[in-house]
Image (spheres, coloured by chain):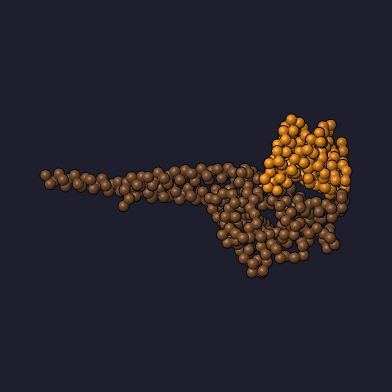
Amino acid sequence: MASLKELKNRIASVRSTQKITKAMQMVAAAKLRRAQDAAVASRPYTERMGRVINNLARGVAGREGVSPLLGGTGRDQVHLLVVATAERGLCGGFNSSIARLTREHIERLKREGKTVKILCVGRKGRDALKRLYGNLIIDTIEHNNVRNIGFANAAAVGDRVLAMYEAGEFDVCTLFFSRFRSVILQIPTAAQLIPIDLSTVAGDGADTGGAAYEYEPDEAEILADLLPRNVSVQIFGALLENAASEQGARMSAMDNATRNAGDMIQKLNLTYNRTRQASITKELIEIISGAEAL
Amino acid sequence: MADRLTFELVSPERLLLSAQVDMVVVPGTEGEFGVLAGHAPLVSTLRPGVISVHDEKAIQRIFVRGGFAEVTPDGLTVLAEEAIDLATLDTAALNARIKDAEEDVADAKSEIARASAQAQLDGLRAVRESL
């Protein structure tokens, strides 16, 4: 049986842990709100971009010399996986669920005999994949000291991916991130970035399908201008979803931790009181039997 | 009073402006064009330049960089990677930012950082020229 002093220390330490987790939960809740607002605010851009690209892509489909961003390189041998995760831990299963999805994907590609390259965005993703696929990771882009993800951050990642594509370093690019559904549900998602998968681009173009657009300059040139932009926009959207998911996951993880700490304090208090009573009873018995012996 | 044009200016980060206006002049890649209500459907890319939003007698001038404009029967939508309202911009602050950006380019350690700093700088210089 632990001594009273030990128990007291234990209770104090669990209590301070609980304070920390409680504070982290509240911070995450505040950040979540902001991250969610940012994700919602970015939607109009993504949607309109998707709609226009969809319209254009339909127009040029099947024509010769379409951008390789749309039609692909004609091969699918080398796959680049962009894995977007958080910079910090302590957010429940957030990072590990993205890493798991990536791992499954890598294994499948390997079975098919493809070459895999990994570009990590976020430190935790690299940490999770380093042990198994350290030799496949070509680089890690960290947003460690970025407070709010801005479009410039996403554009930097996008430019990097595009430069590699132009250099012929890969044929297919897939982006891994976590889609934010709610505080308790984030869905790890794989989205194909290059060549563009039109079925996943927002907007089906049905509402404007009837209107005949004038294009200035012509369709192919606009498309050539928009497709690289779209890569950055998609990455930006994913990073924002990720930020919201991370905070959501952290919030519920910390809520759990706070509750568990509460349970633990209760149990320890019970043991503490029992031990205290037992020692008092013991002392009384000793005094009484001592007095009787006289 | 003629029909009013629904104009929306959207950046990746948020919806910047959504209003009913008289006319908008957009800096297209192949020249500036004015959009009034009832314009034919059009898609055009943008060059860095200034959008003039004409409303009643007031003219709001907004610098935009990178993106495209889409005219539908419902109105005009401009998608810009960067948009700065010229009225809220003062020259001293702009020059300070350009100086910062120049230092960023010089200090950049990796190629990616340099490229993004350079893009930032080019954008800022274009703003200064359009003043």
Q: Is residue A166 above or below residue A34?
A: below
Residue at the (88%, 48%) spot, across then down: B40
Name the quadrant of the C terminus of chain A.
top left
Instruction: Using residue A168 as the reference point, say whether residue A286 is left or right of it.
Output: left
Q: Where residue A134 sits in the image (x, y, percent)?
A: 60, 59
Residue at the (47%, 43%) spot, across then down: A19
Q: Is residue B77 above or below residue A133?
A: above
Q: Where residue A83 sits in the image (x, y, percent)?
A: 64, 56
Image hue for chain B:
orange
Q: Nearer the viewer, residue A27 or A185?
A: A27
Q: Nearer the viewer, residue A231 or A15?
A: A231
Quadrant housing residue B5: top right
Residue at the (77%, 41%) spot, across then down: B122
**Chain identifier, brown in the render:** A
Residue at the (15%, 44%) spot, across then down: A291
Residue A284 visible somewhere in the drawing: yes
Q: Where residue A287 sits in the image (x, y, percent)?
A: 19, 44
Q: Is residue B44 above or below residue A74?
A: above
